[in-house]
Image: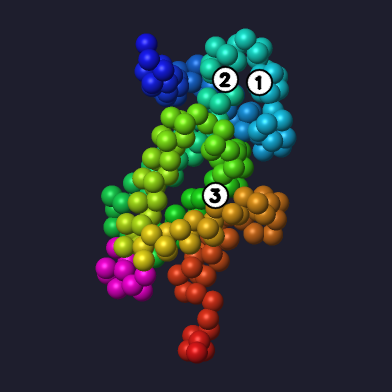
Amino acid sequence: MSAGNTRDGTIVAARARREPGTRATAKRGEVVRKAAELFDADGYHNTGVADIAAAAGISKPTLYHYFAGKDEILFWIHEEFMDELIARQEKRARISMPPSACILELMSDMLEMTETRPGVRVFHEHLRELRDDQQQLVRDKRERYQNLVEDVIREGVASGELRALDPRLATLALFGMVNWAYQWFRPDGPLGSREIAYSFWDIFVKGLAAEGKLR
């Protein structure tokens, strides 16, 4: 078997292990959550397989029954984040929602996951620790999601609700606002993710200048 076929088979196997509805999948999900918490607290490189197994209440050999290694757990984290974001926006795309309202929900999605989901730091910082084939699969999903967001802005421009700006640059600006929040957001802070989303939306859609005051 070629190296390419071996890697393809490994990814297929990894994704098959995510099939819902089984006790094994539920246990794998628990292991991923514990690993994500450790990655957030101690760093990806400082967390070993033995640490993850201990946090999940299983032995190291048992962990290898569920995952091929630490990189597969990291791959799960990336896939779960992207699958959730894509699913939420695809669901919205099937209903009638004004583009500006959809932008608020998109921002809220990303900030809510920053608030509630462990693993957000490794999601943003450790894509390069994945194998090349895994990285490409994650990048494909990120591109798919970016296209969904661009479509919202493009629709807003076409309808006249938004100014005629470059949809891709506007999308990248939106991502820049919300994706950096993991660096400073604190769940026990004065504002929750939804409140921050409203403020970010107001800045992004309406701008900073007071009405009629910009020269």
Amino acid at dot 2: Gly
Residue at the spot of label 3: 112
Colour mapping used in the image: rainbow
Q: Residue at x 48, y 62 (%)?
A: 173
Does dot 2 land on a helix, a strand or a loop? loop
Amino acid at dot 1: Val
Q: Position of residue 70 (x, y in %)?
A: 59, 24
Residue at the spot of label 1: 49
Amino acid at dot 3: Glu
Q: How many marks?
A: 3
> How far is disc 2 from disc 1 in space, using C-alphas?
7 Å
User: Is residue 85 shown to the viewer in this render?
Assistant: yes
Q: Residue at x 65, y 13 (%)?
A: 60
Q: Position of residue 186 (x, y in %)?
A: 68, 51
Q: Which mark is residue 69?
A: 2
> How far is disc 1 from disc 3 in space, using C-alphas?
28 Å
Q: Residue furthest front?
A: 2
Q: Position of residue 80 (x, y in %)?
A: 48, 35
The magenta stretch is 155-165
Q: Residue at x 44, y 54 (%)?
A: 106
